[in-house]
Amino acid sequence: LGQIKAGEDAPGLAVYDPGFVNTASCRSSVTYIDGEKGILEYRGYPIEQLAEKSSFLEVAYLLIHGSLPTKAEYEAWAHEITYHTFVHENVRTFMQGFRYDAHPMGMLMASVGALSTFYPDARNISDAENRHIQMVRMIAKMPTLGAWSFRHAQGKPYVYPDNDLGYTANFLSMLFKMSESKFGADERLVKALDVLFILHADHEQNCSTNAVRSVGSSQVDPYSAVAAGIGALYGPLHGGANEAVLRMLKRIGTKENIPDFIKGVKEGNERLMGFGHRVYKNYDPRATIIKKACDDVFEVTGVNPLLEIAQELEKIALEDEYFVKRKLYPNVDFYSGLIYEAFQFPPEMFTVLFAIGRTPGWLAQWSELVQDKEQKIARPKQIYTGDRTLDFVPASERW
Ligand code: ACO
C-alpha cells in the first residue's frame, strides 16, 4: 500500500492511528476481550471461573501452553517453578547497589534486564526447550526480585525463598517475615493475592504487552523484552493507576468532598483515576471480582476507611451523565489499591505486584510472537511533519 503514491515525494497510502486504536499489530490466541459486553477470557476460559476455581500457577500454565495441565503436567510445572525461585548471588549484590529510596519498580525493571546477562543462552529463542526454561525462570524469580525490591526500600535484609511454600505464600514470606506481619500466614490473604495475580495475568495488547512484543520482535532475549514491558507498566496511565487511585482517595479525604472533586474532573482539571478503559466500555469484569476479594481481605485486616469513599465515588460517578455518556466505569485498578494497602504494601509496590501477575501473559505473548512466522519486526510508519531539504549553515557562520 505504501507504494500507492500521489506524487514522487508523497509518503504513500498509510493509516494514521496514534495509540493503535484501530490497528491490530498481531494475531493472537491467548486472551479474548469483548469490551462492550465486559467479557475477558484466557485461552477461552472466563476470568470469573479461573479466579474462583483455579490457581495462579495453573493459569500461568494455561496461558503459556494454551491448554489446562493434567495432574502430572501441573506437578512437573509447579516443581520446575519452585526449583528456580533463587537468583544468582550477584543479582542480590546488584540490587543492593540501588539508592536506599529507589522505587521498587525501577529496581525490578533493572534486575529483570540484568538477568539477560546471567542467562546468555536465552538469546537462542528459536529453540523451544530453551524458550521454556527461560519462561520458567522468569515466572519463578519475579516474586524473589519483587520482594527484594520491597525489602530494599524498607532497609531490611532480603529474605530468601522458602520452597516448602506455594508460589504466592512464598512471595508473602519473602516480603513480610512472619514475625513482622500479623497477617502474613492467613490463608485467606494468600488466596486473595493469588486471585489478584490471576486477574492481572494477561490482557491482550495492552501497553506493556505491546512493549514486550515490540521489543521481542527484534528477536532479543525474553528478559530484555519483559524489562521493556515493566517499563511500560511503570507509567501512571497503565500500571501506576492504582497507586494514583489511592492518592486520589486520600486527597478527597471524606465523602463530603466528593461532589467538589467530581466537579473538577468534569471541568477537565484531572481524571477520576481507576475509571475508564481503552477497551472496556462496560464494567471491567476484573473490577467485580476484586470487589468481592476486598470483602475477604478486609475480613482479616479490618476495613480500610477509604473503601467508603471509593464506594460513594463509584455510586455518584455511575449516575453522572459525564461518565455515563463516555462509558466510564471502574477498572481493575479502582479497588486493587485498597486491597494492597490492607496488606500494608506501600503504594510504590503496587505496580510490582501487577508485574508479577502479568509475567505469564507477557511470556505467553512473547512465545506466540517468536513462533509466528508472519510476524515482522515492529516498525510503524509515521506521518512526517518537519521541515525538508534545508541548507545546513556551519556553526561558525551562524553564530
Ligand atoms: N476521568 C475523567 N474523564 C475521563 C477519564 C477519567 N478517568 N477517562 C477518560 N475520560 C474522558 C476523556 O477526558 C475523554 O473525554 P472527551 O471525549 O470529552 O475528550 C473521553 O473520556 C475519552 O477518553 P480517552 O482518554 O480518549 O480514552 P482512552 O481510551 O485513550 O484512555 C484511559 C483510556 C487511559 C484508561 C483513561 O480512561 C484514563 O486516563 N483513565 C484513568 C487512568 C486509569 O485508571 N488507568 C488504568 C487503566 S487500566 C490498566 O492499565 C490496568
Image: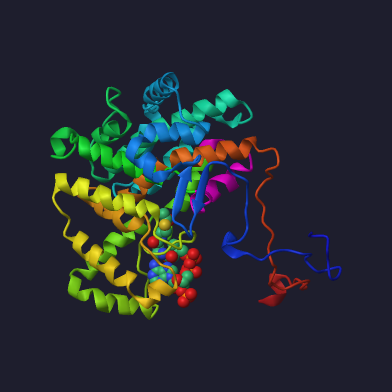
Colouring scheme applied when the structure was drawn: rainbow
**Which is more toward the observer, 239 or 305?**
305
**Which quarter is ligand 1 in?**
bottom left
Q: Quadrant of the C terminus?
A: bottom right
In the image, residue 114 sits, relative to residue 255, either above or below, namely above
Which quadrant of the structure image shows residue 138? top left
Where on the picture, by quarter, is residue 3? bottom right
Judge whether residue 188 is colored magenta. Answer: no
Looking at the rendering, in which quadrant would you find the N terminus? bottom right
2 over 254 or under it: above or below: above
| Res 98 visible | no
Q: Position of residue 241 (x, y in %)?
A: 37, 58
Q: Is residue 259 left or right of residue 327?
A: left
Magenta span includes 220: yes
Specify the segment rendered in magenta.
204-223
Q: Residue furthest right?
A: 8
| Nearer the observer, 120 or 241 | 241
On screen, 107 above or below 157? below
Q: Residue at x 18, y 70 (%)?
A: 254
Q: Using the image as rendered, state which of residue 110 and residue 70 is in the foreground.
A: 70
Residue 269 image offset from top left, x and y in percent:
37, 77
One can see residue 77 in this view: yes
Vertical order, 312 against 66 (above or below): below
* Residue that appears at 27% across and 68% down: 315
